[in-house]
Amino acid sequence: MSIHNWFKRKKAQQETAYVRERLDIPGNLWVKCYKCNQAIFTKDLEDNLKVCPKCSYHFKLTAAERIIQITDPNSFKEINQKIVSKDFLNFTDSKSYAQRIEKSILKSNLYDAIVTGLAKISNLPVALGIMDFSFMGGSMGSVVGEKIARLIELALEKKAPVIIFSSSGGARMQEGIMSLMQMAKTSAALGRLRENSLPYISVMTDPTTGGTSASFAMLGDVNMAEPDALIGFAGPRVIEQTIRQKLPPGFQRSEYVQEHGMIDVVCDRRQLRENLSKFLRWFDER
Ligand SMILES: [Zn+2]
């Protein structure tokens, strides 16, 4: 089947993706916390913004869930929704990259690992980018880079601040050097934002690693993170093997990274919207 027919079929589903709510069907009523093993009623977990009521473990959110939690109701207008990656290298490992993309689109109801658009938070306009880990581990390839660059260009045009939520395993290896180039591309776009005195708030969620952490995720005027998120470049196992030393407890978690001066604020998801509003208001009044 050609990819075009395939997209047509997807269209109806796609359009309702942001308003759809998960149905409480049997078998989906309870979830177990990954951290403390507590069984939680799904509805209670969702009411608590997907934070475990017992141990405050922050479950991963889809981009759609994040939009609902963070933005003013119905204020989000998506841009550049249907940009799809090219298989530049004709890359195949256990599966071809083209197949992986198709499968990820089906599974996540997204076209790539970031959703971008304009929205309002506490009635203040923002250009918003939200990565979604469910699309190929939130990996940054040419589409993520392009969508971030276009988002920043739109922010410049509208004179709006930029907020990007990261959730990413790093650069997308299937696109090779094209993925690495997105680090420079997104950083340069943020440089233009800075030249024009527009603020950028980066919110790192679990995990923010590799090329994402080494580019736009760490370049915020304010760098925020959700609690206990894995934030770093290479993973702890790789570092331990390289330096042949045991790493300290809590290494590369939000709190540790903050203590070492790389993050400004570690913010519980339940206060995130309020704190973002405060920062936006503060910047707005400058
Ligand atoms: Zn828990």
Image (spheres, rainbow, N blue to C red):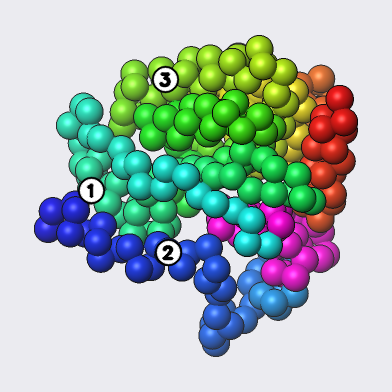
Residue 150 coordinates in the image, percent (x, y): 47, 31
Q: Amino acid at mark 1?
A: Gln
28 magenta-colored: no
Which dot, 2 or 3, sits closer to the camera?
2
Where residue 71 sits in the image (x, y, percent)? 69, 54
Magenta stretch: give its range.
45-72
Q: Nearer the viewer, residue 170 or 240?
A: 170
User: Pointer 2 and pointer 1: residues touching (CB < 8 Å)?
Assistant: no
Q: Which residue is mark 2?
A: 15
Element type at mark 3: helix
- In 3D space, how far apart are the residues under numbered discs 1 and 3 (Cα atoms)? 22 Å
Q: Main secondary structure of the magenta part?
A: loop
Is the shortest distance between ligand 1 and the CB of mark 1 under 8 Å? Answer: no
Label pair 1/3, CB-CB below 8 angstroms: no
Which of pointers 2 and 3 lies earlier in the amino acid sequence?
Answer: 2
Whether residue 11 is situated above or below residue 244 in the rendered picture: below
Q: Nearer the viewer, residue 234 or 143?
A: 143
Residue located beneath label 3 in the image: 180
**Residue found at x 69% / y 32%:** 161
> Of residues 173 and 183, which is closer to you in this image?
183
Residue under pointer 1:
99
CA–CA distance in space, label 2 to label 3: 31 Å
